[in-house]
């Protein structure tokens, strides 16, 4: 049986579109028939809110997976999107670093949870996912290292704004540390340019700088700065359900196509 591909959606800067990308890429992949699980690994829990999961529904969260080793299936919730499930996140995640400080294997907690679930899927009776997207917090914390250790590849949202590349050196350094000691096969699946404003020449300048730096790792699709993308989470919906004709929704549909194309080429 083909095992799911696990992607961490990561950038230590906040406000670059990690959660928006997790929600809408997950929705677009589900729309073309893939079964997707989002792991909300941010204490803010915005991916959960953006998919209509209330605080009261979050009886088990990703915190319980990594701290109490609760089986993943006990924390999974269905969403309003067919074929898209979520392990919600909540404020308890902010204490994970302290609570696991004495565990020499703390960086493997999420990997152990996901791989244990995958093993039980192979035994039958549980949902088989094609893709797992881990929505990471805006920091290079123990949570982010856990996500990188658990993942096959990284998807890096990068905003088309001044100093967009600032801080990426630290991210890439962390990736190398994880590769050298925790996950030697970790790769970057792609870099997605977000908040692109075609009316602003700075967006083109930043896009050119990022493509010069990352080369073919940068997706052709760029995610525009779009009001409907920003509005959708307040209605508990992905943009693709809130307004599937808006430029942001259309961009995420194209991005999903690119991700699948890269996955097909990798497997060939």
Image: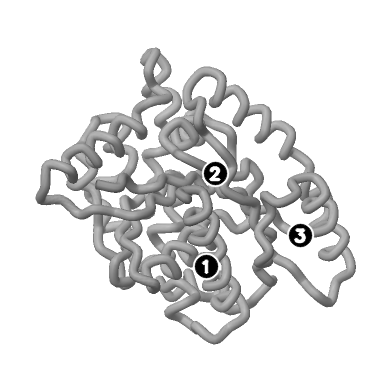
- On the image, the x and y values in percent for residue 192 come to 64, 57
Would you place residue 125 above or below residue 236 in this image? above
- Name the disc covering residue 257, or none: 1
Label 3, residues with CA under 10 Å away: few <14, some 14-19, many ≥20? many
Cα–Cα gap, marks 2 and 1: 17 Å
Closer to the chain start, of discs 3 and 1, is 3
Q: Residue at x 65, y 67 (%)?
A: 221
The residue shown at (45%, 71%) is 238
Q: From the viewer's perspective, is residue 59 above or below residue 235? A: above
Which color mode does the image show? one colour
Residue 178: quarter of image: top right
Say which label, 2 or 3, has the lower sequence index: 2
Q: Which mark is residue 28?
A: none
Q: Residue at x 35, y 68 (%)?
A: 52
Disc assigned to residue 154? 2
Q: Residues within 10 Å of mark 2 (few under 14, many from 20)?
A: many
Tell me which numbered mark, 2 or 1, is placed earlier along the sequence.
2
Whole-percent x and y of residue 144?
Answer: 51, 35
Q: Closer to the camera: disc 3 or disc 1?
A: 1
Q: Answer left or right for 86 relative to 70.
A: right
Closer to the eye: label 2 or 1: 1
- Camera-nearest residue between 97 and 164: 164
Q: Are marks 3 and 1 in contact (CB under 8 Å)?
A: no
Helix, strand or loop for disc 1 = helix
Q: Are marks 2 and 1 in contact (CB under 8 Å)?
A: no
Circle 3 sits in a helix, a strand or a loop, which is it? loop
Residue 59: % across, % down = 22, 50
Give me the disc on residue 160: 3
Residue 213 found in image quarter: top right
């Amino acid at each position: 049986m083909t095992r799911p591909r696990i992607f961490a959606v990561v950038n230590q800067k906040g406000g670059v579109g990690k959660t928006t990308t997790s929600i809408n890429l997950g929705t677009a992949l589900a729309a073309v028939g893939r079964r997707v699980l989002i792991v909300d690994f941010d204490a803010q829990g915005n991916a959960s809110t953006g998919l209509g999961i209330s605080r009261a529904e979050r009886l088990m969260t990703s915190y319980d997976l990594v701290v109490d080793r609760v089986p993943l299936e006990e924390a999974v919730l269905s969403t309003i999107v067919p074929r898209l499930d979520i392990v919600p996140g909540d404020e308890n995640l902010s204490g994970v670093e302290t609570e696991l400080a004495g565990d020499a294997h703390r960086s493997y907690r999420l990997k152990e949870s996901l791989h244990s679930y995958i093993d039980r899927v192979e035994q039958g009776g549980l949902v088989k996912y094609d893709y797992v997207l881990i929505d990471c917090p805006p920091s290079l914390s123990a949570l982010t290292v856990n996500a990188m250790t658990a993942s096959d590849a990284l998807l890096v949202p990068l905003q088309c704004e001044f100093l967009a590349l600032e801080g990426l050196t630290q991210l890439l350094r962390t990736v190398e540390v994880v590769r050298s000691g925790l996950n030697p096969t970790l790769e970057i699946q792609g870099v997605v340019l977000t908040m692109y404003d075609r009316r602003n020449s700075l967006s083109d300048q930043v896009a050119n700088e990022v493509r010069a730096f990352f080369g073919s790792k940068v997706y052709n699709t760029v995610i525009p700065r779009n009001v409907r993308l920003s509005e959708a989470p307040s209605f508990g919906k992905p943009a693709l359900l809130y307004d599937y004709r808006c430029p942001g929704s259309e961009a995420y549909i194209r991005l999903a196509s690119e991700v699948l194309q890269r996955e097909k080429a990798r497997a060939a």
